[in-house]
């Protein structure tokens, strides 16, 4: 009897496995030959917009793509998904990562299988990526965020007639008030892209102009790019009441902080990297508005759709062996939307690998918000 049950069980198991295989080879669901775009997790508009640009480029080149992100913003969840993608023989993987460790084994497998990996937004270790696509320089973002937060703490509007740096230096030179305290509401504790920006913020705060006027220690909290956790952390800033301005270099964090600060009528101000559509309730929208009547007088970001578009161009070129990500190599991005044809050059990244840096960030403030809300 026992033997019969064992036999029956194995038959059922084999049938189950066969059904699984049939599913995988089913044309509609098959990922074979597709270009995969993987964001940190699902439910993040920033990732969705990047995929929009990625898909648009792949389509324009007659390629098919798919958006595959895990539900959880963790390294483990991404690794598990990548394992599956390798088995399914995808053509390439373009990824924004949740951490800087834990991917080596699975990415080595991808490499062995000939699957090209390009990172975008949050990078992959240099040994396993063709190159990394950054929207704008890490230093530029870190510096600009500290400058914007300082100006906001000093009650200064976004300067349209000079640079953020010059405006900050001038404003600080005549400042004699209390030391300004800045907080940071980041993504997870080990997300490469946010940590890179925070390093640059700390560096910026070492400049002479800040000494004795802005606290060089940043009060950092982590919201894990999760709305609930980010809201809890924003509320912690509010109840502790130690910082003057929160910098949130993540679209999830900045929107959560915007809501928390608005609901509690807090006097703490906010800036960071945000999507205009998600920040419209917390920001001024017309020239007639007083920017300081709002939680977030100004903030910045870049064209997220274009970031996805450019990453797709780099990945496809690598997949076709037309681009190997070495310093000096270029990729040409065909004209699209408001962009003319662009040739972008690969440069050295400070992690020893290479990168393509697309351009400058945009500052969103009362005079251009309405226009951007429609786009991002
Ligand atoms: C978030 C993500 C992403 C970051 C943007 C600004 O949605 O954390 O990594 O680059 O915001």
Image: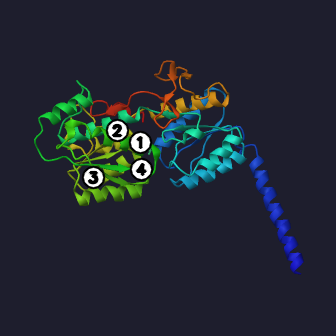
> How far is mark 1 from mark 3, CA to CA?
26 Å
Name the image quarter holding residue 107: top right
Q: Nearer the viewer, mark 4 or mark 2?
A: 2
What residue sits right under mark 1 in the picture? 196
**Are the two marked residues, 1 and 2, in contact with CB atoms closer than 8 angstroms?**
yes
Q: Bin the neighbour count of mark 1 within 10 Å (Cα to Cα): few under 14, some 14-19, many 20 and up.
A: some
The residue tagged 3 is 261
Helix, strand or loop at mark 2: helix
Sequence-wise first label, 1 or 3: 1
**As drawn, is 90 to the left or to the right of 19?**
left
Q: In 3D space, how far apart are the residues under numbered discs 4 and 3 (Cα atoms)?
A: 18 Å
Q: CA distance from mark 1 to mark 2?
A: 8 Å
Residue 284 visible (yes or no): no
Q: Position of 158 compared to 311: left or right?
A: left
Q: Nearer the viewer, mark 1 or mark 4?
A: 1
Question: Which residue shows up at 61% across the image and 28% down it?
Answer: 324
What residue is shown with label 4? Answer: 187
Note whether ligand 1 is within 8 Å of mark 4: yes
User: In the shown orientation, is residue 112 left or right of residue 279?
Assistant: right
Point out residue 31 in the picture as x, y percentages from the top left corner. Answer: 70, 43
User: Which quadrant of the render holds ligand 1?
Assistant: top left
Disc 3 residue lies near ligand 1 with CB under 8 A:
no
Q: Disc 3 vs disc 2: which is toward the camera?
A: 2
Q: Which residue is mark 2?
A: 142
Residue 82, position in %: x, y? 63, 48
């Amino acid at each position: 009897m026992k033997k019969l049950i064992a036999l029956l069980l194995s038959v059922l198991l084999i049938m189950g496995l066969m059904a699984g295989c049939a599913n995988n080879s089913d044309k509609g669901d098959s990922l074979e030959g597709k270009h995969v775009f993987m964001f940190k997790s699902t439910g993040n508009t920033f990732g969705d917009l990047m995929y929009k640009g990625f898909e648009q480029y792949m389509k324009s080149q007659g390629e098919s793509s798919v958006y595959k992100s895990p539900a959880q913003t963790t390294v483990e969840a991404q690794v598990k998904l990548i394992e599956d993608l390798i088995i399914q023989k995808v053509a390439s993987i373009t990824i924004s990562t949740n951490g800087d460790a834990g991917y080596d084994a699975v990415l080595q497998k991808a490499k062995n299988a000939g699957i090209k990996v390009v990172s975008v937004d949050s990078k992959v270790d240099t040994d396993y990526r063709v190159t990394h696509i950054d929207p704008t320089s890490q230093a530029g973002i870190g510096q600009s965020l500290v400058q914007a937060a300082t100006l906001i703490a000093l009650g200064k509007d976004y300067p349209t007639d000079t640079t953020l740096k010059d405006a900050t230096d001038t404003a600080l030179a005549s400042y004699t008030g209390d030391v300004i305290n800045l907080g940071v509401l980041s993504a997870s504790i080990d997300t490469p892209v946010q940590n890179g920006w925070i390093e640059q913020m700390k560096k910026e705060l070492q400049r002479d102009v800040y000494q004795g006027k802005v606290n060089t220690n940043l009060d950092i909290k982590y919201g894990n790019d999760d709305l609930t956790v980010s809201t809890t952390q924003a509320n912690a800033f509010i109840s502790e009441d130690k910082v003057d301005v929160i910098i949130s270099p993540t679209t999830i964090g900045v929107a959560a902080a915007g809501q928390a600060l608005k609901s509690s009528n807090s006097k703490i101000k906010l800036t960071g990297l945000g999507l205009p559509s998600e920040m419209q309730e917390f920001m001024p929208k017309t020239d007639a508005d007083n920017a300081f009547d709002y939680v977030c007088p100004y903030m910045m970001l870049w064209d997220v759709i274009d970031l996805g578009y450019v990453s797709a161009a780099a990945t496809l070129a690598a997949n076709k062996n037309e681009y190997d990500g070495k310093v000096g190599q270029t990729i040409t991005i065909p004209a699209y939307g408001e962009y003319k044809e662009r040739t972008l050059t690969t440069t050295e990244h400070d992690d020893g690998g290479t990168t393509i840096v697309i351009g400058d960030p945009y500052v969103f403030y009362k005079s251009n918000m309405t226009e951007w809300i429609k786009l991002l």
